[in-house]
Amino acid sequence: MTMTLYGRPWSGSIGVEFVLEELAVPYQRVLVTGYREAIQPASFAELNPLRQVPVLVSDDGAVLTESAAIMMVLAGRHGEGRLLPVSGSAEEAEHLRWMFYLAATVYPTSMQVFHPENYTDEPAHHDGIKARTWTVLNQQWRVLSEALDGKLHLVGDSLTVADLYLAMFAQWFETMDKIDDDPRMRSFREHHLARDPVARVIARHQSGDWV
C-alpha cells in the first residue's frame, strides 16, 4: 500500500516530504486548499478537525498529524532508523531537544509572521504583530545558528530528522529579508537544500504542479 500525504505547497508538509523522499517511502499527495470552514476537500475536516496540514494516512489507515511527529514516526519505521540517533544515547536527547525547539518554539512564532490574522480580530494590528514577531523569531533563529557553529548537522556528524526539519524552516525564511541570515545558517541551508531528495521536493513545489 501507499501512504497518502494531505498538504499544500510551501506548507508544513514540505518537511514530511523531505523525510519521505530521503527514505524512498512510496506515497501519494492530495492537495488541500482553502482555510478553516472553506477547506477543500470538505472531508479533510474528518481527518483533522483543526483543518491543518500536513496529515499523513499510513498504510494501515492510521491518521497522523503534526509535522514533527509525522517525521519522527516515519524515521522510526523506515530506513532502519538511519535518520535517528541511537536510542538511549546523549545524541538522542539532543535530537529530541531540537525537534521540540523547532516544533514548539520556532514554528508557532513563525506563524505569527505568516498568519497574523490568527492572533487578532483587528487587521490594523497585523503590522504590529509581525514587527514584534520578527524580533522574537530572530532571537530564536540565532540560537540555532550558534548551535550549528559552522557544522552541517544539528546533532552528531550525520543526517537526522532534525536537520530536515530545520531545512524546512531555512527554506521558508530564505528570501525573507527580515530574518537574520547568519553565515553559519546560510552554509547549512545551501548544503541541505541542494541535496537530491530535498531538491526534488523543492523543484516540485516550484513547478506549480504539487500533486
Image (cartoon, grey):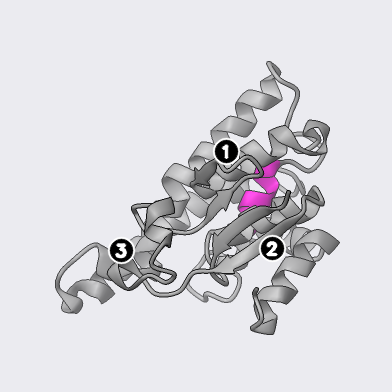
Residue annotated with mark 1: 98
The answer to whether any part of residue 13 appears in the image is yes
For disc 2, the marked residue is 186
Which numbered disc, 2 or 1, marks the residue that appears first in the sequence? 1
Side (left or right) of 166 relative to 47? right
The residue carrying mark 3 is 132
In the foreground, 156 or 72: 72
Q: Nearer the viewer, mark 2 or mark 1?
A: 1
For label 2, count other residues whose C-alpha is less than 10 Å away and answer few (under 14), some (14-19) or many (20+): some
Above or below for 107 versus 202: above
Displayed quadrant of residue 201: bottom right
SS at badge 1: helix
Q: Position of residue 178 (x, y in %)?
A: 47, 72
Left or right side of 108 for 208: right
What percent of the width, then of the height, locates residue 68? 55, 44
Picture residue at 77% right of the left edge, 54% below the top: 26
- Dividing the image into 4 quarters, which one contains the C terminus? bottom right
